[in-house]
Amino acid sequence: MCPYYKRPKARLSILFLLSWAFLFPAYASDFQFSYTPACQKAYQAIMNLHFQEARRIIASEKSSGPGNLIPLYLENYIDYLTLFIGEEQGQYDKIKPVFQARIDAIEKGNRFSPYYNFCLGESHLQWAFVHLKFREYTQAALSVRKAYQYFSANATAFPDFIPNNIGLGTTHFLGGIVPDSYKWIAGLMGIEGTVSQGLQELRSVADYNGSNDFYNQFKPQALVYIAMVSVNLGKNKSDALKIVSLFENGNISQSPLIIFARANIMMKNGLNVQALDLLRQRSHDAASYPFYFLDFMEGNAKLNSLDTSAMTDYRFFLDHFRGINYIKSAWQKVGWLQFIKGDTLGYRKAMAKVLDSGIANGEEDRQAVKEAESKQIPNLVLLKARLLFDGGYYDKALNELLNSPTKSFLFTRKDLVEYSYRLGRIYHESGNPDKALSFYRLTIQRGKNGPWYFAAASALQMGLIYESRGDFSRADSAYNVCLECKPAEYKNSLSQKAKAGISRIKSNRH
């Protein structure tokens, strides 16, 4: 009886394999995923924004190994960075149709390879970020969903494929910070994730210590993501400084992407002088794709010290950048510089440009529009204190607030609310959290029902102080106060940070 039953099983196995190959011809095709030394060299060029060099290497690799699909993944990386950095609508319209053709080609690859789901997931995730840049929110959510499905499938089939965790971690992280005003996006994404979960997965990539070149290439990217999340959504933003210090040496240490991340984290930690030095010393390589946002950042670093030479950096950014974001914000800052110099007419001209230029897409641009539409001259003392604080010049910021009688510059309720908030922030960052708490409470008392962001930001900072002390009950309460506030400015970013804090508290309690 036994031999009789073995034969059908053998025939069934053969038929199964034949039908499998018929249904999925890619399995039997020559399209594979091979991360060759040339591909590694192209990736390094891409990270340094040397796109022309990378394309030459990729073209040569395609010629010598036409069945290798990794070059298509690398080409998508170039297009992604081109659109994400440049933000040019014309480029977007030109490149967008190429994306689907590239996806179709990658789908012909070996589905038994972990690179199959990985390359498709990464490509869709990159384009999700591009769609967000160009305000295609539905398409962005659907792209994140596709990416998540590919990464999840890979995690099940190939749990030891470390690079997959960079995409999986990013999608889980995104699922945990969707603002309440965009809940419909979260529904389309279909992701149940948290910031903590995403960070844990990203750390598995950053902690890899093996010899696989493909695995190792994602360590810097994972570290940058971890650092950026830590400085923006973590309870201790100084943790990010330890991470970015790892990029001081290495073959991508001078990458504009790494310089952007390092300078951003330094500025968020009040290390304005160090950030300015880094931005000033960066290479202006003609072979590198222009990253004009770094000029905008250099202007910000100078503005934070009230250095009016920042005007040159903002003007350069405005004259050369052809994208859609930060145009309004740059004109606002030009206006502030004019106002600081005593040129009220120059301020008004710059604010008129705020209304006539760019798109109010991001929170900084929307805030610039709000100021321009109000037609109100800024409070010079509060403006200087704000800028000096942002640069980490805490003593100078405090002197601005305390060296003049309050009656000489506090004229409105908004001025009064902002005054207590600025004092709270200065004392907080200067190492006096108890004094900061008293001013944060005063700010919430004065401004919780107002349209300004000061009360919500104060509640967020109170939450961070209490969380750092292990007082999770008060921290949770403070974060929820932040969520209850309805400021007309920075609502989404403040809510994201408060939700991240609540998520951390839940993780600690479990």
Image (cartoon, rainbow, N blue to C red):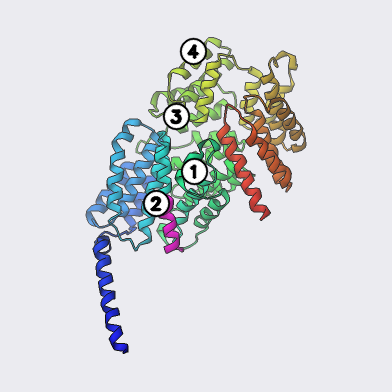
Could you tell me if the residues under marks 3 and 4 are in contact, i.e. CB atoms within 8 Å?
A: no
Quarter of the image for residue 24 reads bottom left
Which tag, 3 or 4, sits closer to the chain's start?
3
Q: Is residue 240 magenta?
A: no
Amino acid type, residue under disc 1 in the picture: Ala
Q: x, y (%) of residue 437?
A: 74, 35
Of badges 1 and 4, the one in the foreground is 1
Could you tell me if the residues under marks 1 and 2 are in contact, i.e. CB atoms within 8 Å?
A: no
Q: How far is disc 2 from disc 3 in space, using C-alphas?
A: 27 Å
Amino acid type, residue under disc 3 in the picture: Asn
Q: Which mark is residue 349?
A: 4
- What residue do we see at 45% from left, 45% from top? 189
Residue denoted by label 2: 121
Residue denoted by label 1: 186
- What residue do we see at 33% from left, 35% from top? 92
Amino acid type, residue under disc 2 in the picture: Gly
Does 467 appear above or below 411? below
Q: How far is disc 3 from disc 4 in space, using C-alphas?
A: 20 Å
Q: Which residues are magenta?
A: 147-160
Say which quadrant the C terminus sits in.
Answer: bottom right
Does 278 appear above or below 224? above
Of badges 1 and 3, the one in the foreground is 1
Q: Which mark is residue 325?
A: 3
Amino acid type, residue under disc 4 in the picture: Lys
